Amino acid sequence: ALPISTQKVMQLLVRSFDTRVVDTLVCQSAADLKCLLATEDELPLEDIQLYNGPNVLDNSTMLCELPANSAIDVIVPLLGGKVHGSLARAGKVRGQTPKVNKLDKIGRA
C-alpha cells in the first residue's frame, strides 16, 4: 500500500444489497473491500465478484487507482441458477403455430 501522504483518497459507491459509500482509506484494495462485504453483508468471501463497469476487479486492484466517482457492483453467483424457459422446448413453438398465408401488401403513404 502507498503511504497515506501520497495516496489518492476518494470515496466509491459500492452497490451490494444496498448502496453505500466506501472510503479508499478504509478499503485500499479489492481484497479489503471483499473482506468488508463478507463481514457486513454476510456474503461468502470466496464467491464475491467486484465489477467497475464491465471490468472485473482482481484482489490486487488498488481502489484509489480507479477513476473518480467510480461505482463498484458486487456480484455473488447463485448455485443451481436456471435459464428462463426450458431449452428442451426451444424451437417447438414454430411447429405448433398454424400457418397463415401472407396477404397482398397494401401500399402506405
Image (cartoon, helix red, strand yellow):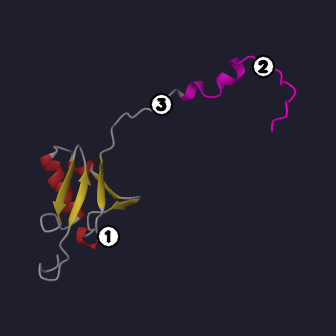
Q: CA distance from mark 1 to mark 2?
A: 55 Å
Determine whether label 3 and label 1 are within 8 Å by CB. no
- Residue 103 image position (x, y, % from top left): 84, 24
Of the two numbered discs 3 and 1 in the rendering, the one whose residue sits closer to the viewer: 1
Q: Please tell me which residue lies in front, 60 or 36.
A: 36
From the viewer's perspective, is residue 8 above or below residue 92? Answer: below
Residue 39 in magenta stretch? no
Q: Is residue 98 magenta?
A: yes
Q: Main secondary structure of the magenta part?
A: loop
Whether 25 is drawn above or below 107: the answer is below
Quadrant assignment, res 6: bottom left
What residue do we see at 83% from left, 21% from top? 101
The span picked out in magenta is: 87-109
Which three-letter amino acid code belongs to the residue tagged 1?
Pro
In this picture, residue 104 sits left or right of residue 61: right
State the separation of the CA atoms marked 2 and 3.
27 Å
Using a 10 Å C-alpha cutoff, classify the residue at mark 1 as few (fewer than 14 neighbours), some (14 to 19) or many (20 or more): few
Disc 2 vs disc 3: Cβ atoms closer than 8 Å? no
x 24%, y 50%: residue: 46
Q: Is residue 41 left or right of residue 16?
A: left
Question: What residue would you read off at disc 2?
Answer: 99
In what element is the residue under mark 2?
A: loop
Q: Amino acid at mark 3?
A: His
Q: Earlier in the sequence, mark 3 or mark 1?
A: 1
Residue 25 x, y percent position in the rendering:
13, 68
- Looking at the rendering, which quadrant does residue 70 occupy? bottom left
Q: Disc number at residue 84?
A: 3
Q: CA distance from mark 3 to mark 1?
A: 36 Å
- Which mark, residue 67? 1
